[in-house]
Amino acid sequence: MPPHIICVGKTTLDQIWPVGEMPTGGGKFRATGFIAQGGGMAATGAVTVALLGAKASFWGRAGDDAAGHVMQNEFACYQVDTSQFRLFPGARSSVSAVIVDRNGERMIVNFPGANMPGDADWLNLDDIAATGAVLGDVRWPQGVSRAFAAANRHGIPTVLDAEAAGHADFARLLPLTGHAIFSVPGLRSFCGGRITDHFEALASVRTLGCSVVAVTMGAQGALWLDDNGEHHQPAFHTSVVDTTGAGDVFHGAYALALAEGADVPAAMRFASAAAALKCTRQGGRAGIPTRDEVNQFLAQNP
């Protein structure tokens, strides 16, 4: 039976415009298409888990507005459980404008939402005891810390999508995290600025108690540090069309691999393959591969 992964954190409605060249300065620019779909770190991680063939639940918040209902309906289309996804009256959902050029590079302008209650006491933690892993992001520290603490009590793996955040959020979440996977901006944020040595930066994260600390670096692959030392997962070579959501896909695939019993090197390779395939397609969630596609890709790239 496939494992159940609980994903806790941020959901955003992404409005994506593909363009030939990235706009500069003011003016009017023509897009070659348009996609509107859900985004957000933990939310897209949940959709990734579902498309890879496992059971996924998303725990989070949005406004009881048009964007919130669009995202709720989209989760249902992907068969993601939303019994603990709450739409709050009077709150405004997070919405992003994403511009993607022909090389796959993107510019994101995000409205983070407004009047969203931070409190997480309403979450029912009963399902965590039987889950395979809990994935959280840094955008809802109250909810993620509560879910991670419960997971730790039951010996359930915890994976943090560590994007840029404030010191207080890192201090709250990292001691509860088993596997902390940073973006480069997220690791810079933790270090307070410039990074001179990535492994040295990861070692400083690990002092907070994480078993595995990693940083994803796009075409340079992923680096991680654990009890066995320093490691590197090279990136798979693909034709990049759109990098939107690639990091979110990586985290969802990694959490699923852990829940299935994979060791860290195998989980890193599986997650890297899923993220690489996503980058060959337009859109965040629209580009997420299936399990058969990832397995076939891995077989072709031993």
Image: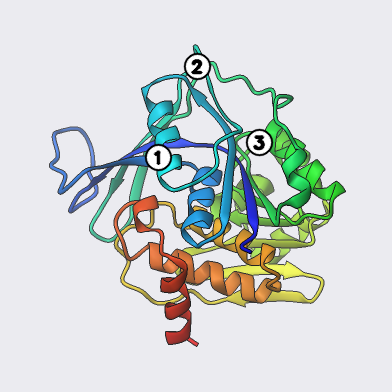
* Local crowd size for mark 1, using a 10 Å CA cut-off: few (<14), some (14–19), many (≥20): some
* Local crowd size for mark 2, using a 10 Å CA cut-off: few (<14), some (14–19), many (≥20): some
Percent coordinates x, y for residue 254 in the rendering: 60, 63
Point out which mark residue 74 bears. Answer: 1
- Residue at 58% from the left image edge and 34% from the top image edge: 83
Percent coordinates x, y for residue 258 in the rendering: 68, 65
Q: Amino acid at mark 2?
A: Ala
Foreground residue among 106 and 256: 256
Point out which mark residue 17 bears. Answer: none
Closer to the eye: label 2 or 3: 2
* Local crowd size for mark 3, using a 10 Å CA cut-off: few (<14), some (14–19), many (≥20): few
- Residue at 46% from the left image edge and 19% from the top image edge: 64
Mark closer to the chain start, 3 or 1? 1
| Any part of residue 193 in sight | no
| Any part of residue 61 in sight | yes
Q: Which residue in the structure is indicated by mark 2?
A: 91
Q: Which residue in the structure is indicated by mark 3?
A: 166
Residue occupying the far top of the picture: 90
Q: Secondary structure at mark 1?
A: helix
C-alpha distance separating marks 3 and 1: 30 Å
C-alpha distance separating marks 2 and 3: 23 Å
Query: Do labels 2 and 3 touch, CB within 8 Å?
Result: no
Q: Amino acid at mark 3?
A: Gly
Q: Secondary structure at mark 3?
A: loop
